[in-house]
């Protein structure tokens, strides 16, 4: 009786150990996930455009629509003065990453991404517009100047955000964010992210 209980206990322990070993082989992250360029591209492209840096600019602008003659400007001239807070988002379009940009060699995964670029520019809050128009322009072609002011504020904000140090900072943040994200995808492998 003692011998049969002993054999049953040994059989139970061996079955339990075998089940644990089999479960570890079948369901461990390294065994269930084959990392190749397709897996990485799918993970990146699902993210779309990755915004990595947001800048806020508050710059006053003046637009002068002059005819070149003080007399004509009295009737048809226009001066728009505007101020507004503009938000500019920079980041990387991950849909532009191709299979040629992914290199998987052993335990090292290298990704090449495009440099950061402007994603969008939008006003935050109201835009204050002061519009001085010539007498006849006000009567015949009244233009509040809002659209022209918004276009100019957008252009000025884009120009400010395109400064090399700001684009470089957004690119560096993209490298960090993508490397952090891909570590979850590739398991214990080393991830390197380079700018094209």
Image: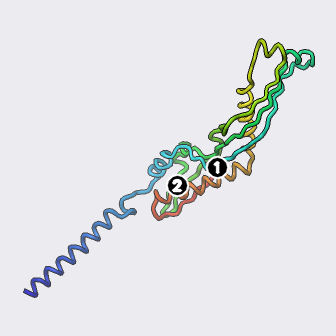
Foreground residue among 1 and 24: 1
Say what secondary structure mark 2 lies in.
strand
Q: Residue 183 at what x, y percent from top left?
A: 50, 60
> Which residue is denoted by mark 1 in the rendering?
53
Q: Residue 173 at what x, y percent from top left?
A: 63, 54
Camera-side mark, 1 or 2: 1
Say what secondary structure mark 1 lies in.
strand
Foreground residue among 195 and 65: 65
> Which residue is denoted by mark 2 in the rendering?
103
Q: Residue 159 at what x, y percent from top left?
A: 75, 40
Q: Residue 74 at what x, y percent from top left?
A: 89, 17
Which quadrant holds residue 72? Answer: top right
Q: Is residue 134 left or right of residue 190?
A: right
Q: Residue at x 92, y 19 (%)?
A: 70
Q: How would you rate the neighbour count of disc 2 (Cα within 10 Å): few for under 14, some for 14-19, many for 20 or more?
A: some
Q: Earlier in the sequence, mark 1 or mark 2?
A: 1
């Amino acid at each position: 009786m003692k011998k049969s209980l002993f054999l049953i206990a040994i059989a139970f322990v061996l079955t339990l150990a075998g089940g644990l070993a089999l479960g570890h082989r079948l369901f461990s992250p390294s065994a269930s996930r084959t990392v190749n360029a397709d897996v990485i591209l799918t993970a990146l492209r699902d993210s779309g455009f990755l915004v990595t840096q947001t800048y806020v600019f508050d710059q006053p602008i003046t637009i002068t629509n002059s005819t070149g003659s003080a007399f004509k400007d009295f009737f048809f001239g226009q001066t728009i003065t505007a101020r507004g807070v503009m938000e500019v988002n920079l980041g990387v379009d991950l849909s532009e990453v191709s299979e040629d940009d992914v290199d998987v060699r052993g335990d090292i995964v290298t990704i090449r991404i495009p440099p950061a670029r402007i994603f969008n520019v939008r006003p935050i809050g109201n835009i204050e517009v002061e519009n001085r128009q010539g007498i006849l322009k006000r009567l015949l072609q009244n233009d509040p100047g809002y659209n022209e002011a918004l276009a100019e504020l957008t252009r000025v904000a884009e120009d400010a955000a395109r400064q090399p140090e700001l684009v470089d900072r957004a690119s560096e943040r993209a490298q960090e964010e993508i490397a952090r994200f891909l570590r979850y995808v590739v398991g214990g492998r080393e991830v390197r992210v380079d700018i094209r």
